[in-house]
């Protein structure tokens, strides 16, 4: 059993994890010189939508990243470490990707800057961040303000089931309503509707428990409707149990998310099956099940 656990874990990590340093992992399984029919490189097969972004050349440097930002009218707000540059180029432009670097290595920086590039090239117009309670407000108040590249106009809102007045107004603005719980188009305020046209990149943060509530789901439905969405499941191990309400809600969101990211420094807390829920959100066939 120990051998099976070790081999399965190593296999998954080699195939899908963003490796912060060293040579790129071998992601292809070949049979008689050809790629296997099932393959272990589904992520590699995704079309890179960032144009010339060198998805398969993680050895790209900070200078390459700065050039990419400049080309798209942006400027880095904070300078990344080498492993963050590496992680950015590995994940950039893929439909789905898992950021499983250790805690404290700067996965948030990668995700924010990747979202900025995807927005600038027109691939997304909205970001949905699902995070533990407390961490979700940290995204809004600290991380996004600190790391969002200069040259990006964005509007943020934080969902709380018992939101204060200013939070309700911010959420209403993001959804195009005067208040977050207005459900009909005729309730739109003309001024708010005008503002809606120039919100820039829309960013909504919601906690893991809220996504399975009636109020939370109503907001999510309104938010993702008719928009191009990047969904970031932060601390994705919170949805490790595939029968949990959190995981079921996450899977229900999947069809509305054009780009999907999971991020956690502890993908396996007990058994390899902890990865099943989060990886199913990326791709139900990603583990060959």
Image (cartoon, rainbow, N blue to C red):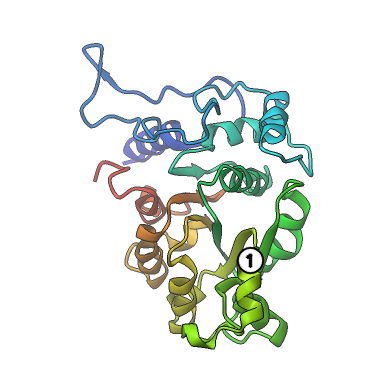
Q: Residues within 10 Å of mark 1 (few under 14, many from 20)?
A: many
Mark 1, secondary structure of its residue: helix
Towards the viewer: 8 or 125: 125
Seen at 30% across and 23% down, the residue is: 29
Residue that carries the numbered disc 1 in the rendered image: 136
Report if residue 194 is visible in the image.
Answer: yes
Towards the viewer: 134 or 184: 184
| Number of disc labels | 1
Indicate the position of residue 160 as horizontal and vertical percent values. 60, 79
Seen at 26% across and 41% down, the residue is: 288
Indicate the position of residue 95 as horizontal and vertical percent values. 43, 43
Quadrant (top left, top right, bottom left, bottom right) of the N terminus: top left
- Please identify the quarter of the rendering in which residue 195 is found: bottom right
- Please identify the quarter of the rendering in which residue 71 is found: top right
Residue 67 left/right relative to 132: right
Towards the viewer: 219 or 129: 219
- Please identify the quarter of the rendering in which residue 180 is found: bottom right
Seen at 70% across and 87% down, the residue is: 165
Indicate the position of residue 248 as horizontal and vertical percent values. 35, 67
């Amino acid at each position: 059993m120990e051998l099976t656990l070790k081999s399965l874990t190593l296999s998954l990590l080699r195939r899908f994890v963003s490796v912060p340093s060293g040579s790129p992992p071998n992601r292809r399984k070949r049979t008689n010189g050809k790629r296997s029919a099932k393959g272990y490189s589904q992520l590699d097969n995704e079309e890179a939508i960032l144009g010339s972004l060198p998805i398969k050349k993680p050895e790209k440097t900070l200078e390459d990243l700065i050039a990419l930002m400049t080309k798209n009218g942006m400027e880095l707000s904070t300078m990344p470490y080498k492993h963050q540059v590496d992680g950015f180029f590995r994940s950039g432009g893929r439909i789905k990707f898992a950021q499983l670097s250790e805690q404290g290595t700067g996965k948030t920086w990668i995700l924010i800057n990747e979202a900025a590039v995807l927005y600038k090239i027109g691939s997304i117009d909205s970001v949905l961040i699902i995070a533990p309670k407390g961490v979700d407000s940290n995204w809004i108040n600290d991380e996004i303000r600190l790391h969002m590249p200069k040259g990006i106009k964005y509007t943020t809102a934080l969902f709380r089931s018992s939101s204060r007045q200013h939070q309700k107004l911010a959420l209403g603005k993001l959804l195009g309503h005067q208040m977050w719980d207005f459900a009909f188009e005729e309730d739109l305020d003309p001024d708010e509707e005008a503002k809606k046209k120039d919100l820039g990149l829309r960013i909504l943060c919601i906690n893991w428990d809220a996504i399975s509530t009636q109020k939370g789901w109503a907001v999510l439905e309104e938010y993702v409707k008719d928009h191009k969405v990047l969904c970031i499941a932060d601390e994705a191990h919170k949805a490790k149990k595939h029968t949990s309400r959190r995981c079921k809600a996450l899977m229900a969101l999947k069809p509305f998310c054009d780009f999907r990211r999971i991020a956690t420094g502890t993908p396996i807390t007990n058994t390899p099956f902890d990865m099943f829920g989060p990886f199913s959100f990326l791709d139900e066939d990603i583990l060959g099940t």
